[in-house]
Amino acid sequence: MIDTISYAEHLQREGDFTAKQAKVLALQRHEIEESMMTKAELANLATKQDLIELRQDVIELRSDLKLLKWGMALTIAVVLIPALKQLLML
């Protein structure tokens, strides 16, 4: 992060800018630096390989959920249907 006042003063002193020009340039530089990502932020971005692996994980989870759904349906059929038959015979 830059000190905009010091930077503007430097532009006036060393770059022959007017006070207004130096202030505008210093503020613009500050805004640009504020909008830039840091190295740490860039390091945390997902890579294409990360997204491919995530997609594979989602596909595997979907398969696991399908198996779980069918397993629950089978359990209901094996346990609940005989229980209902027994209940209805009473």
Image (cartoon, helix red, strand yellow):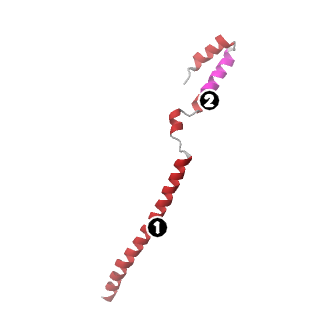
Q: Secondary structure at mark 2?
A: helix
Q: Is residue 27 above or below residue 59?
A: above
Instruction: Give the residue at mark 2.
Output: 32
Residue 86 pos. (x, y %): 31, 85
Q: Main secondary structure of the magenta part?
A: helix
Q: What range is drawn magenta here?
A: 19-32
Residue at 45%, 64% in the rendered image: 65
Q: Quadrant of residue 17?
A: top right
Residue at 51%, 56% in the rendered image: 56
**Separation (CA) of disc 1 from disc 2:** 49 Å
Question: Which numbered disc, 1 or 2, marks the residue that appears first in the sequence?
Answer: 2
Image quarter hosting the C terminus: bottom left
Residue at 39%, 78% in the rendered image: 77
- The amino acid beneath tag 1 is Lys
Left or right for 36, reference 90 = right
Q: Are marks 1 and 2 in contact (CB under 8 Å)?
A: no
Disc ID at residue 66: 1
